[in-house]
């Protein structure tokens, strides 16, 4: 079903597609999207609808113990550094009130904000907070930047659509980079200027290009830190929406997290055993454990003297060693670090949401499909650390189709679901249409004539010797198979030889299914800000429907 509406001067047409119709989605995720309440054993506080999340507010407030003043002072520091707008600071003041809750989302600190789903996460949280406020629940949207992650390769590139409609990527790595460093602390050097030059040398030049170049050049400048540049870009892009920004590397927040760090160290064996059991339970029901937890697992990383984030592995009773090195710690030493030097520790993927929801009065979290799978496992960590498991929603999910690509798809009766079959199948569909009518008709006539003659031959052969009929049937199948193969190759060649059609289909796949995956997982938001201007964020915000759990196709 399609819905049409106006956002400013733009007319948008939005339709929805169930995730079960999209390839490569996990069963756990699709079942959660269809009926979260059916998976209550894994998601104890799941709700059927976003409108039901307000029922969780009393539980959140009753279990919240963090000093709001210290928390909000830390949020002011981060949001001021990010140059957030006035509405952000109004929301931080609202969060100081004891009856305010947080709608939280987050993402790794990616180059130029990374894939566009980062924006979809942020705006999903904004929409939910505004919905709660409208219902009488005080709520603010908070974006947790995962600056402690240390896989720099995963965040050091970004993808765009160039002036010709092709996919291209730019990357950045500082000359002096220490492997294993938290990405948030990586210092940007002069090499970033070449990356920005490369980006704007490939993007189409529009009325918005120069303004965007200034925005990125100001945010991503030599001497800035990678995490700060990420947050500043996000804040400037979404300045009007009042998003509150949180950097978990902030020293105030590290100190506030001390109690949950200490508790996690003390109960680490219980956490590991429960995570392994939960993984087994998921697999026994035909699901998958998103994170494979081994008995040597430890829920926290340690930051070494050179600033690297190092995994810890249990090597004996109460003894832990940094992965790949010889440094060893006893459980009591790790507990002392958690108590006295919390900045030396960093939560792993199974503990991070619990730390997040200890620091914040989180009423719900917006994540991706993988994060939903994580929550099926780490709800056990919430239980062991005596914290209420946070309801999780899938962020809003979009494919943006501009007028040019929409016209091409309509001309050849294609849509996103048909593109899932791949470019070759799509070209064959095109070739059997207007551009290949004569050739397709010739093959159809030939197949019909061959079948007619083979039918005549079958009747004659059967009268002479009935045992030859089966032999003829096998050979008929081979003949028709080879005719079909020649037909496919010919029609494909016909389509490929049409330079206009070939360029158009390549452009469609580059824009809508880059690298064979959903657009939102690759393309950066600056592709669309450069093309449509700052109002693009408003269009996405207006297209959000929190009650729709599907993937949304937005025709601009």
Image: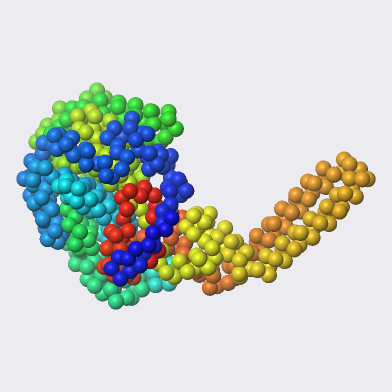
Would you place residue 100 above or below residue 84 in this image? Answer: above
| Quarter of the rendering containing residue 388 | top left
Of the pair 206 and 194, the residue shown nearer to us: 206
Q: Position of residue 282 (x, y in %)?
A: 39, 31
- The residue positioned 27% from the left and 63% from the top of the image is 538
Tell me the colour scheme of the image: rainbow
Q: Position of residue 380 (x, y in %)?
A: 28, 30
Of the pair 371 and 45, the residue shown nearer to us: 45
Q: Residue furthest top?
A: 317
Q: Is residue 159 left or right of residue 215?
A: right
- The residue positioned 63% from the left and 68% from the top of the image is 436
- The residue positioned 28% from the left and 45% from the top of the image is 50
Of the pair 3 and 91, the residue shown nearer to us: 3
Q: Residue furthest front?
A: 135
| Quarter of the rendering containing residue 29 | top left
Q: Is residue 509 visible?
A: yes
Q: Is residue 292 visible?
A: no
- The residue positioned 43% from the left and 60% from the top of the image is 512
């Amino acid at each position: 079903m399609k819905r049409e509406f106006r956002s400013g001067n733009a007319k948008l047409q939005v339709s929805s597609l169930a995730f079960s119709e999209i390839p490569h989605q996990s069963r756990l995720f699709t079942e959660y999207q269809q009926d979260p309440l059916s998976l209550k054993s894994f998601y104890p506080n799941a709700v059927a609808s976003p409108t039901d999340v307000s029922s969780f507010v009393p539980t959140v407030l009753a279990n919240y113990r963090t000093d709001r003043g210290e928390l909000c002072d830390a949020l002011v520091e981060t949001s001021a550094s990010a140059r957030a707008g006035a509405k952000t600071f109004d929301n931080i003041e609202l969060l100081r009130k004891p009856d305010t809750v947080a709608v939280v989302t987050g993402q790794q600190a990616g180059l130029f904000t990374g894939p566009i789903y980062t924006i979809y996460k942020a705006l999903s949280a904004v929409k939910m907070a505004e919905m709660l406020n409208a219902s009488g629940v005080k709520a603010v949207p908070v974006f947790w930047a995962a600056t402690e992650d240390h896989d720099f390769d995963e965040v050091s590139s970004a993808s765009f659509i160039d002036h010709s409609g092709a996919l291209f990527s730019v990357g950045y790595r500082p000359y002096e980079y220490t492997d294993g460093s938290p990405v948030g602390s990586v210092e940007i050097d002069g090499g970033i200027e070449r990356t920005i030059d490369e980006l704007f040398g490939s993007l189409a030049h529009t009325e918005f290009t120069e303004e965007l170049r200034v925005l990125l050049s100001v945010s991503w400048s030599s001497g800035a830190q990678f995490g700060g540049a990420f947050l500043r870009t996000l804040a400037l892009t979404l300045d009007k929406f009042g998003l509150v920004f949180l950097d978990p590397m902030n020293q105030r927040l590290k100190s506030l997290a001390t109690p949950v760090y200490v508790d996690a160290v003390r109960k680490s064996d219980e956490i590991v055993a429960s995570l392994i059991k939960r993984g087994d339970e998921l697999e026994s029901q035909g699901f998958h454990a998103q994170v494979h937890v081994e008995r040597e697992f430890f829920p926290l990383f340690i930051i070494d003297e050179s600033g690297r984030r190092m995994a810890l592995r249990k090597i004996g009773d109460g003894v832990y060693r940094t992965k790949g090195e010889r440094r060893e710690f006893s459980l009591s030493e790790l507990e002392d670090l958690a108590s006295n030097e919390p900045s030396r520790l960093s939560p792993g993927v199974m503990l991070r949401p619990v730390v997040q929801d200890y620091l914040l009065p989180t009423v719900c979290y917006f994540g991706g499909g993988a994060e939903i799978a994580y929550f099926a496992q780490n709800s056990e960590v919430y239980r062991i650390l005596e914290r209420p498991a946070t309801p999780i929603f899938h962020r809003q999910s979009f494919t943006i189709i501009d007028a040019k690509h929409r016209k091409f798809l309509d001309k050849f009766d294609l849509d996103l679901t048909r593109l899932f079959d791949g470019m070759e199948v799509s070209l064959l569909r095109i070739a059997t249409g207007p551009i290949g009518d004569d050739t397709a008709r010739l093959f159809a006539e030939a197949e019909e004539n061959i079948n007619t003659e083979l039918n005549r031959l079958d009747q004659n052969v059967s009268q002479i010797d009935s045992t030859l009929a089966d032999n003829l049937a096998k050979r008929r199948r081979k003949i028709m198979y080879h005719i079909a193969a020649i037909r496919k190759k010919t029609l494909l060649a016909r389509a490929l030889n049409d330079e206009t059609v070939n360029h158009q289909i390549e452009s469609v796949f580059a824009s809508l299914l880059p690298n064979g995956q959903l657009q939102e997982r690759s393309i950066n938001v600056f592709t669309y800000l450069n093309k449509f201007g700052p109002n693009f964020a408003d269009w996405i915000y207006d297209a959000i429907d929190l009650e729709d759990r599907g993937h949304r196709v937005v025709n601009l």
